[in-house]
Image (tube, rainbow, N blue to C red):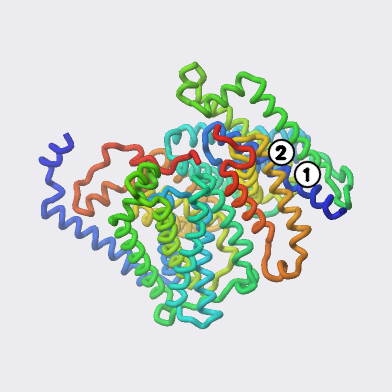
Amino acid sequence: MEKLVQALVNGVIFGAPYSLLALGLVLVYKGSRVFNFAQGEFGTVGAFVTLLLQSHVPLLLAVIGGVISGAVMGLATERFVVQPLFDAPKVTLLVATAAVALGAIALQLAIGDAEIRTLRPLVSGDAFVIANVPVLWQQLLIILALAGLALVLWLFFTRTDLGLAVLAASQEPTATNLVGISVRKISALVWGMAALLGAVAGVLVAPVAQLTPGFGTSGLLIFGFVAAVVGGMTSLPGAVLGGILVGMVQAFTALYVQDISWVSDQITSPELVALFVVLVGVLAVRPAGLLGKEA
Amino acid sequence: MAVADAAIDRSHNTSTAWVSRGAVWVVLALLVLVLPLQLENFHAQRWSLAVIYAMAALSLNVLIGYAGQISLGHQGFLGVGAFMSAYMVSAHGQTFWAGVVVAAAVTAMASLVMGLVALRVRGLYLALVTLVFGRMAQETLFNLKIFGKGAGVEAPRPEAFATDHAFYYLCLIALALVLYADWRFTKSKAGRAVTAVRENEQVAASYAIPVAQYKLLAFVLSGVFVGVAGALYAHRITRIEPQSLDFPLALFLIIVTVVGGLRSRTGVVVWTVGFTLLPEYLADTFGSNAPFISQAVGAALLVVILVFYPGGIGQLIRPVTRWLGGGPFKRDDEGGFVEEGVRGRP
């Protein structure tokens, strides 16, 4: 029983960062049908800017600076990479965003070589202990941020005209332009919001992870994508659900499968095998993801 | 208008033009075949790697360019070939040649299985499945007990091609075979069928093209190419380890394929070789700042090429390749995208 609670708690802790990242990925996909490979780097850049600022200004200001820098990077990506390639095949856009990520990693390498750093957490120490699993304040903060941002996004899309305009632009760009909504401006807005989400994920996760150049891409991005796709690439609640699900798969494999001696004797990282099976399984049964629909 | 121009302008077909064409061909041949002999071993090593990557990129070109299926886990397939060949040679005492054949066969089979997934999971969703497959291959498959649990497998070179220079020529021969197979494929009924399936499955099916079979065929062909590349990859450094088959390698492969120019053999090969060698030689020049410079230059170059030449390097150098093939030296008039490529909607 305790083991089960442990796995569930760990699942949420592991999964919350993936959900945050997946929200940004889904937002961009809704807005411009692009798989954005730069999403992880919006976070890493934010974290690195925070790192540079934190010795000069109060930590909270440094974090805000980091988030803003990530958002600015997102807007720049939209303006200089996505806009010019508006009519290009989707794989070209995918490659272009990957190039943005590679360039960002190169910049981080230039600033802070390959050294492993840690960012100071906003709030340090343990919040509480459940079933012998200590939950850090920072981890709780990530979960709260996820819940808050998901709520804000939900309100944005269901209660505001601007949210409706974003949905319209994603479904029928030509008609949207005709009724006087600028699809280009909407695209910039969506990328800015997504980058903001990515940057929040980066600055919040970096203190509980190892901050190395490209950590957002190598550590988070793949799982964020799995979360987004399993949840349904067009569904924001799906992104949150998918992230938690991916976290659960990792936590349960770590607690229940890793210890089987045959498994640990034969293979390493069984959680990736489990994740692959879950991904293919979900897509085989529901090709549009758990909560996804064509919209 | 274009017809009239072609009727008047015959300057590309004069004997002078053919002499200069021949001269360029000779220079190219010298560059590829003779220059490495004059250079030290490590240059030949680098050039072999570039040629091997070119084969892997051509394999990816079959999938993305011809069949319209995105693979983000191609390093996984490269690794399957590499580990199978190394395993056959070092654990079963087979010859290198048997290793290559087994590598090609097993990789083709693995690729076929991915093709079966692709029959149901489409577009960017498939890209994600391959992405996770690649990551899993690197961290789990290649760490299996029979593959040394992460320690890697020895992969000695065949005796006749033991030196770095000889191995380079072996890679060149393999690349030539892959290019020939690719060329014949695109000229065959199967090649046209795969193109038709990429453009529109319903229309293809209405012309009695068995859609699923041709999709799977593309996966098998791609698997054979990358399997051979993988075997050479392992034996080049005489030892294969899982760490080298990471996600950045998959990104590298997809980048060189797309920037090289989908469906442009020359573009893909030229750019893969260029993009492999450029960072290495930049590193020689700039020393410690090399990783930053090569990556930053690479990324910037990438965006610039994609924005101004969406058809990639293949589009950029088409006047030259057309001229070398006996045609006139002029740009494509249509500009922009040659064809609509992989569609976004899954």
**What's under tag 2, amino acid-wise?**
Leu
Residue B47: x and y in percent read 41, 65
Dot 1: few (<14), some (14–19), or many (≥20) neighbours within 10 Å? some
Q: Are marks 2 and 1 in contact (CB under 8 Å)?
A: no
Camera-nearest label, 2 or 1: 1
Protein chain holding label 1: A
Residue A198 is at least partly visible in this image:
no
Residue A111: x and y in percent read 62, 47
Residue A63: x and y in percent read 73, 36
In terms of depth relative to the viewer, which is nearer, B10 or B228?
B228
Judge left or right: residue A233 versus residue B261: right
**Residue at the location (36% across, 67% down)?**
B172
Residues behind callouts 2 and 1 on a single chain: yes
Residue A284: x and y in percent read 57, 49
Determine the secondary structure under disc 2.
Answer: helix
Task: Tell me the CA gap for discs 2 and 1.
Answer: 12 Å
Q: Quadrant of residue B341?
A: top left
Residue B77 is at least partly visible in this image:
yes
Q: Quadrant of residue B184?
A: bottom left
**Residue at the location (59% across, 52% down)?**
A280
The circle drawn on residue A53 is 2
Protein chain holding label 2: A
Judge left or right: residue B108 versus residue A14: left
Dot 2: few (<14), some (14–19), or many (≥20) neighbours within 10 Å? some
The circle drawn on residue A120 is 1
Determine the secondary structure under disc 1.
Answer: loop
The circle drawn on residue A7 is none
> Which quarter of the rendering shows the N terminus of chain B?
top left
